[in-house]
């Protein structure tokens, strides 16, 4: 390995200190070129412009920092590996006291390269494509500051699923299933599951329930009422306000996010550690 990029949480002195220490270690002991970024300094194309191009991006922070790094990759085939300096850390699952072991295993090629599904989110306005975004975790429509519930028509494979009345709606990937989706009562999806979950947020009807659909199907979302305005959020980032003139089309991206994992990694151990999954009250 000739080059590695480090992305550290911008508001953490601990993350900055660790980034500097790792940079010194890698330069002095491994003769590797290091590119270091604060999570707020990441821009579109920042990794592709680097010379030499980084072969791995190491994330020091929480899941928000990890998501920021994934957005900046722009379809590049550069794997991410995360070290958790946050609170929960589902994406940045390696512990801080293991960071030098993780780095050495990266350099020795002892971590497995895996793929995580991404979602393409097409935002149409007045029938015309306005912009396209990518999502690793989730796509959320919420009522925002307005007091009334939103009504959302949900289509899957061009078939009407529901005309939903709720505080909002979450479309989640398997990676994002343990985030807002889980808090709203949605299902946990194993990371390699080829599916998306559709989860209402505080639905007005008791019959509105989460549903899991194949990721080969396109999901379309429209506000039902002409005078409503809702907020669109993707991976925790507010994107825009939408109304009944908008349509969202969500489908599995042709590109996946590459991640590095311990070959002995056990997802269910992670659930038990982070969520106390399966423990009796």
Image (cartoon, rainbow, N blue to C red):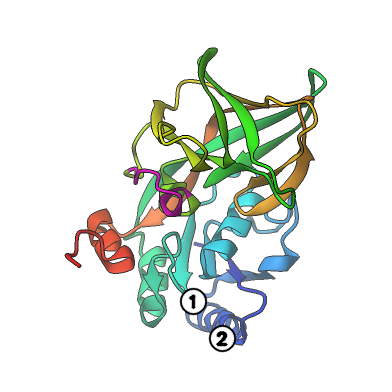
Q: Secondary structure at mark 2?
A: helix
| Residue 278, quarter of the rendered image | bottom left
Image height of 197 relative to 19, above or below: above
Q: Are marks 2 and 1 in contact (CB under 8 Å)?
A: yes
Q: Residue at x 53, y 75 (%)?
A: 31
Q: Residue furthest left?
A: 280
Q: Which residue matches tag 2?
A: 14
Boundaries of the magenta span: 181-189
- For this rendering, which residue is in front, 226 or 249? 226
Q: Main secondary structure of the magenta part?
A: loop
Q: Residues within 10 Å of mark 1 (few under 14, many from 20)?
A: many
Q: Earlier in the sequence, mark 2 or mark 1?
A: 2
Label 2 and label 1: CA atoms lie apart by 8 Å
Mark identifier at residue 85? 1
User: Can residue 255 be seen here?
Assistant: yes
Counting the numbered discs, the total is 2
**Could you tell me residue 208's position as x and y percent?**
44, 33
**Could you tell me residue 26's position as x and y percent?**
52, 77
Image height of 157 relative to 163, above or below: above
The reply to whether the magenta stretch includes residue 60 is no
Image height of 244 relative to 115, above or below: above
- For this rendering, which residue is in front, 187 or 35? 187
- For this rendering, which residue is in front, 72 or 1? 72
Viewed as shown, does residue 267 lie left or right of 45? left
**Could you tell me residue 213's position as x and y percent?**
41, 26
Image height of 228 relative to 160, above or below: below
């Amino acid at each position: 390995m000739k080059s590695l990029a480090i992305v550290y949480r911008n508001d953490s002195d601990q993350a900055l200190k660790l980034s500097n220490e790792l940079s010194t270690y890698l330069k002095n002991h491994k003769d590797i070129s290091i590119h270091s970024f604060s999570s707020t300094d990441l821009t579109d194309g920042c990794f592709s412009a680097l010379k030499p191009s980084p072969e791995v991006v190491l994330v020091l922070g929480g899941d928000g920092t990890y998501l920021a790094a994934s957005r900046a990759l722009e379809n590049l085939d550069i794997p991410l590996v995360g070290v958790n300096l946050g609170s929960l850390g589902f994406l940045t699952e390696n512990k801080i006291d293991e960071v030098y072991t993780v780095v050495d295993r990266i350099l020795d090629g002892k971590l497995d390269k895996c793929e995580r599904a991404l979602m393409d989110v097409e935002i149409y306005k007045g029938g015309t494509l306005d912009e396209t975004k990518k999502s690793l975790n989730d796509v959320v429509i919420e009522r925002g500051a307005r007091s009334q519930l939103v009504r959302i028509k949900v289509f899957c494979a061009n078939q009407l699923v529901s005309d939903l009345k709720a505080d909002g709606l979450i479309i989640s990937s398997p990676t994002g299933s343990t985030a807002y989706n889980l808090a709203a009562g949605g299902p946990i999806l194993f990371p390699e599951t080829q599916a998306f979950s559709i989860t209402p947020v505080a639905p007005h009807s008791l019959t509105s329930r989460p549903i899991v659909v194949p990721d080969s199907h396109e999901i379309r979302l429209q506000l039902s009422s002409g005078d409503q305005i809702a907020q669109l959020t993707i991976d925790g980032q507010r994107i825009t306000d939408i109304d009944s003139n908008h349509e969202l089309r969500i489908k599995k991206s042709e590109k996946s996010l590459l991640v590095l994992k311990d070959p002995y990694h056990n997802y269910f151990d992670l659930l038990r550690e982070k969520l106390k999954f399966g423990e009796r009250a």
